[in-house]
Amino acid sequence: MLREAPTGGRTIDVQPLVLVYDCGKLGDVAKRRAKDHYRVFFSHAHKDRWIAKQCVRLIEETGAGQVRVFLDEWEIEVGQSIPDSVRTNIEQCDEFVVLLSPYSKDRPWVLAEIGAAWGLQKPIMVIVDKVGPKQMPEIINSHKAIDLNDFDEYRDQLSKRVRQRRQS
């Protein structure tokens, strides 16, 4: 696009394509930065949200800036599609954590999220709170679960995975 300058005579060549290209480069940088983080998807029932927030805080502390956790109520903004956001974040996660409680074990959304992670062959980490092995959904009852009271064991294992990834 050519325009005359207010002083006359001079023209300015504005090429929007260049701006789009630059924005694309910035997008690539953002994508690379996101890939640098170990991404965890945290699934839970709404009634367990206080426990979920505490777990997420501890996971992020464990990662010391190297771990990003998706927690629906923190990450999904007003107007965003919940199913699309959930699906995208499960696809992008390095591991899937589910807080399995009497409230969550039969919730349709939690079961759908577990199924999506299973279908995408994501590592599924099960944190149980007052749920026995026979009460676990069939799709994850073969996974070793960690009791919520032993959450530090999960954090230790996560820390090892994050270190291994940084070294590779």
Image (cartoon, helix red, strand yellow):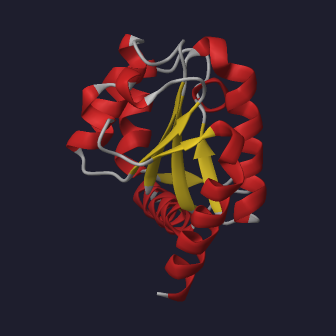
Does residue 12 appear anywhere in the picture? no
In the rendered image of this protein, does residue 71 appear above or below residue 106?
A: below
- Please identify the quarter of the rendering in which residue 103 is found: top right
**126 relative position to 90: left or right:** right
Which residue occupies 43% across, 57% down? 94
Viewer-side residue, 35 vs 19 = 35
Establish if 96 lies above or below 53: below
- Can residue 138 be seen? yes
The answer to which image quadrant residue 90 occupies is: top left
Give me the residue at 59% from left, 23% from top.
130
Q: Is residue 135 left or right of residue 102?
A: left
Foreground residue among 7 and 132: 132
Residue pushed farthest bottom?
Answer: 167
67 or 125, which lies in front? 125
Instruction: Name which quarter of the figure residue 63 lies in.
Output: bottom right
- Image side of residue 119 versus residue 22, left or right: left
- Vertical placement of 139 versus 65: above or below? above
- Which residue corresponds to the image point at 54% horizontal and 15% vertical from the top-left? 79
124 and 92: which is toward the camera: 124
> x and y percent of residue 82 in the render?
45, 20
